[in-house]
Image (cartoon, grey):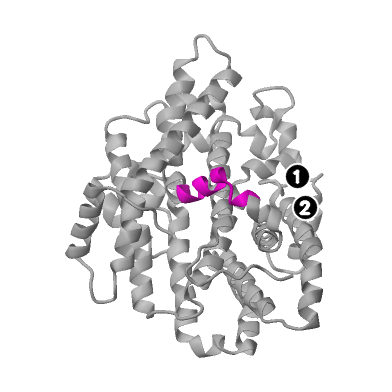
């Protein structure tokens, strides 16, 4: 069960592929939630074509499962961030500031652009589209009064929201609903960095790593940081297995493929747990037995997190899966995944909705919805590519220059200078 051991400076490119596919899944999920809500909750009253609501009761929900895509992001963050600081962690203040700059600059830049687009009326067709689509989620998109507050207040609320788990106001609740994950990303990162920076002596001992691996999951259960706990546990398990020598190493190598296949199948099955369970679902029985009776938690969210961890573990074990995840489409989606995540809902409203409404006289609902899907996804990829070059890459560069003592207006100026010059070489 030995995983490839890359040098400390090498990226796990196949994990970038998983992140890219997860970002695409979330984009498709938002389209389904807006234009085909019956596919998500299995409600026949919301049906737009015969039998479509039945698909919500099948394994096909895996391709547009909102909880699973986000679970992949959190587990990957725990794994990759642990890998980046496990061997020689820098100072915690430096890591914390670097992470904050890396997240906040793209979020604020995109949010300011969205505020301008909203002011210019780019999303005014959403209420009409929501009525035709029978989507409550879509209808609520512009019901929040905080959409109309001044820009300076949006920015201030957004900065505060980054440090709290209540996303009822600010940028995460007003301009871009996907930003509810950003406080979890930042706070989870800060806790992870603290564990590795201030517990460096613990991680030098094998017993310490075993302890962290065993405690990471139960200590984060029933919290927003469950994915981070699974990611840390997975990374520490990988490190421990890499240290196995002798005959046990040969045994683990022979087990790698069958265990990897089993993990992949289990992960896909868990990832396919419906967003809303029904009385006929086998997942409901499993949830009741494992979680409700144990007094832990109800619902399918733990399944999706565990499923994400299983698929990531399978990628670490299976060479064919790693090859698939490092093909050009997966690597490309991984490169633009963060910006694709940030721009998808605004483009669904600003591009998909106009296409859907303007083709109404001559097309039926399904054809208009499919045309909107194509226009939305193509535009989202193009805009994500441009945003990656001009916003995300300069932000990453700037975050790497940041230390605990050098930040402020100089860094903002340096970032603007990088944006003006454009993005040259891609970051690792």
Q: Main secondary structure of the magenta part?
A: helix
Residue 326 lies in the magenta stretch: yes
Above or below, 408 relative to 73: below
Residue carrying label 2: 284
Left or right: residue 423 versus residue 344 is: left
N-term mark: 1 or 2: 1
**Image position, residue 337 (x, y; %):** 48, 49
**Image position, residue 323 (x, y; %):** 64, 52
Task: Report whether residue 170 is seen.
Answer: no
**Image position, residue 383 (x, y; %):** 39, 38
Left or right: residue 59 versus residue 420 is: right
Above or below, 413 relative to 126: below
Rounded to the nearest angstrom, the CA distance separating label 1 from label 2 is: 7 Å
- Magenta extent: 324-337
Secondary structure, mark 2, is: helix
Image quadrant where one finds the N terminus: bottom right
Residue carrying label 1: 278
Image quadrant where one finds the C terminus: bottom left
Residue extending farthest to the top is 362
Q: What residue is drawn where x is 78% and y is 62%?
A: 257
Residue 231 lies in the magenta stretch: no
Q: Would you identify the image quadrant in which residue 36 lies?
A: top right
Left or right: residue 291 versus residue 148 is: right
């Amino acid at each position: 069960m030995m995983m490839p051991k890359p040098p400390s400076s090498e990226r796990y490119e196949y994990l970038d592929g998983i992140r890219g596919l997860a970002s695409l899944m979330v984009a498709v999920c938002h389209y389904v939630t807006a234009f085909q809500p019956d596919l998500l909750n299995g409600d026949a009253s919301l049906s737009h074509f015969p039998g479509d609501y039945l698909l919500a009761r099948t394994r096909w929900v895996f391709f547009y499962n909102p909880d699973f895509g986000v679970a992949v992001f959190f587990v990957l963050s725990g794994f990759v961030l642990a890998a980046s600081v496990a061997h020689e962690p820098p100072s915690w203040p430096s890591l914390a500031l670097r992470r904050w700059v890396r997240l906040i600059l793209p979020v604020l830049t995109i949010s300011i652009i969205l505020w301008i687009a909203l002011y210019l009326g780019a999303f005014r067709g959403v209420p009409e589209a929501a009525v035709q689509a029978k989507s409550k989620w879509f209808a609520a998109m512009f019901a929040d009064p905080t959409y109309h507050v001044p820009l300076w207040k949006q920015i201030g609320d957004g900065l505060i929201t980054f440090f709290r788990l209540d996303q009822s106001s600010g940028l995460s609740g007003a301009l871009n609903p996907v930003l509810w994950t950003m406080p979890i990303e930042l706070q989870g990162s800060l806790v992870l960095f603290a564990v590795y920076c201030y517990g460096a002596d613990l991680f030098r001992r094998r017993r310490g790593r075993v302890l962290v691996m065993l405690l990471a999951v139960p200590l984060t259960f029933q919290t927003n940081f469950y994915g981070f706990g699974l990611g840390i546990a997975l990374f520490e398990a990988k490190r421990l297995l890499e240290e196995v020598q002798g005959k046990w190493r040969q045994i683990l190598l022979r087990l790698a493929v069958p265990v990897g296949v089993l993990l992949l199948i289990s992960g896909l099955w868990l990832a396919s747990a419906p967003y809303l369970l029904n009385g006929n679902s086998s997942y409901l029985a499993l949830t009741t037995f494992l979680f409700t009776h144990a007094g832990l938690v109800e619902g399918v969210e733990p399944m999706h997190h565990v499923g994400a961890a299983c698929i990531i573990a399978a990628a670490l074990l299976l060479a064919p899966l790693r090859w698939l995840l490092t093909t050009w489409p997966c690597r490309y989606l991984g490169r633009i995944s963060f910006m694709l995540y940030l721009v998808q809902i605004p483009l669904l409203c600003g591009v998909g909705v106009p296409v859907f409404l303007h083709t109404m006289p001559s097309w039926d609902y399904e054809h208009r919805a499919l045309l909107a899907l194509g226009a939305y996804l193509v535009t989202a990829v193009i805009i994500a590519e441009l945003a990656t070059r001009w916003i995300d890459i300069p932000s990453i560069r700037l975050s790497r220059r940041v230390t605990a003592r050098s930040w402020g207006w100089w860094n903002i100026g340096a970032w603007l200078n990088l944006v003006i010059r454009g993005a040259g070489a891609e970051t690792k």
